[in-house]
Amino acid sequence: MLELPMALRLFNTMSSQIEEFHPLHDREVRMYACGPTVYDYGHVGNFRTFVAVDLLRRFFRQSGYTVRHVMNITDVDDKIIRNAARDGVSVQQYTAKYEKAFLEDAAMIGIEEPTLVRATEHIPEMAAFVATLVERGIAYRTDDGSYYFRIAKFPQYGKLSKKDFSGMLDGARVDVDEYDKDSARDFALWKAPKPGEASWDTSIGSGRPGWHLECSVMSMEELGESFDLHAGGEDLIFPHHENEIAQSESFTGKPFARFWFHARFLLVEGEKMSKSLGNFFTLRDLVLMGHKPSSIRYLLTSVPYRNQLNFTFDGLKQAAVSVERLRNFQLRLTSGTFAEGSSSEMKALAAQAVERMTAALDDDLNTAQAQAAIFEMVRQGNAGFDTGGIKKDDVAPLLAALTKFDEIFAVLDDDDGPKMKRVLDWAMAEGRDKDVSNELREAIQSGQLSEADIEKKIAEMRAARAARDFKTSDAIRAELADAGILVEITKDGIRWRRK
Ligand code: AMP
Ligand code: ZN
């Protein structure tokens, strides 16, 4: 068997330690991430977690594994049922809109689509799961037709969250999905229907599944009884993941997920994000303000997933500059002219960047260090341009290092313009014209010309200047400026960037 060179080390919430990661199945990683509850548009905190999981998935693949990545869509819960009833539509009609929006947003921010599983499409399996737990005396039915998990039957309860539940009351119950963080209660597996609310008729009676049950049943169905990694935001450790473990391990008698991967909650401008503080932003809000999807993705990845990320507008501007710097470097490589030959210095620079990037990501996904490594290459590479130190044969290794970086970070494609245009179209269709900023309109305008279009114009400018036709050159420059492209004429030639 081919020995994998990688040695990925990941923090495992279960052991509270950094451990070497090895999958259970040879070269295939099986991972499950708790997905969104589709009752509203996703906010920047949600995407902090989803982007962290996307990075992990991409890095597994870059490290030589194939990846089976499953994510659930929670398309039934208390809020959804309540909102659907309020709006007089079915649960499916209500959630379809937000599921679509979630998938569009995830694609906009460079998240590769996992295998999606929907709670409402697995109801009979969930009922059968509950029936088995009842047969074994681990779950019980109450008079109203709800079912609860008897925590006293799972002595290891609390092993993930490290909470001590030794004094808990046998038979004390809770029937909401989120409950007092420090009290252990028998939790609802299945909820009896309430008048006027959606429910399903099943082998255990009518009702609807609890949120925890969904993830246990669907993850094991897709990935097997034991799989490699389970992910989510840190708020899910307790009770959600603790309950998933209790249900699943009671059911199978086997360890459920091996690694537990949790992303730290983000702050916005130093505070916990909340609607009342006015610092609550959906991804679409940020784009409507004129921020590029690539800047948002870059900022979300700039702090390692276990560290607190403070999302600020200054940070977002800085992220835009960083992305632009990377894209410009790439453009200089692909459009420049170089002397024949190669320089050992540049080759070593590219090799070192790749090595440092991989080492950083192997180190519990240290994204900040990986970004620092590529920027060191860009800094020295730019100096190489200015002194003629980059030769023709150096271009390929430098570009390859950028590609390797972008396989993980996914910000180099110059496609913000069309993505932002789609958000603009959506806002207009929703009657949210007043939320569309001038910055968004300008960004779309500047993003409309593709790199190839701009390069063509720059080539025309060069030709005009060579023929000393400065009038034509100035006209093209003005035309580009109107389209949001800044052209700089330096002693080394013509350079451009988006405003
Ligand atoms: P939800 O749609 O509320 O179930 O959340 C979807 C995902 O986003 C879960 O993994 C949450 O843990 C995560 N999440 C929610 N809020 C934040 C936040 N402020 N920072 C990071 N992750 C979050
Ligand atoms: Zn879950």
Image (cartoon, grey):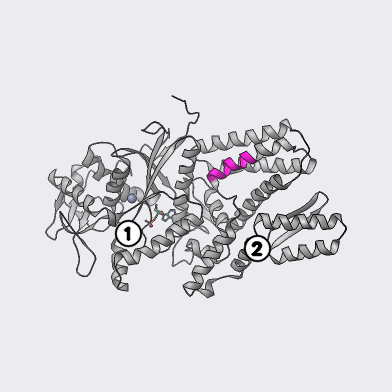
441 vs 78, nearest the viewer: 441
The stretch in magenta equals: 399-408
Say the numbered circle drawn on residue 428. none
Residue 179 in sight here = no
Mark 2 CB lies closer than 8 A to ligand 1: no
Rendering coords of residue 390 (x, y %) = 74, 38
Per the model, the C-alpha gap separating discs 1 and 2 is 38 Å
The answer to which of marks 1 and 2 sits earlier in the sequence is 1
What's the residue at 62%, 39% (across, down)? 400
What's the residue at 68%, 50% (across, down)? 328
Q: Secondary structure at mark 2?
A: helix
Rendering coords of residue 245 (x, y %) = 28, 43
Crowd around label 1: few <14 · some 14–19 · many ≥20 (10 Å):
many
Residue 312 in sight here = yes
Is 393 positioned to the left or the right of 196 in the image?
A: right
Circle 2: residue type:
Ser
Q: Which residue is mark 1?
A: 75
Crowd around label 2: few <14 · some 14–19 · many ≥20 (10 Å):
many
Q: Main secondary structure of the magenta part?
A: helix
Q: Quadrant of ligand 1?
A: bottom left
Q: Residue 42 in magenta?
A: no
Residue 288 picture quarter: bottom right
Is 118 positioned to the left or the right of 130 in the image?
A: right
Say the numbered circle drawn on residue 446. 2
Q: Secondary structure at mark 1?
A: loop
What's the residue at 52%, 41% (across, down)? 366
Is 126 positioned to the left or the right of 430 in the image?
A: left
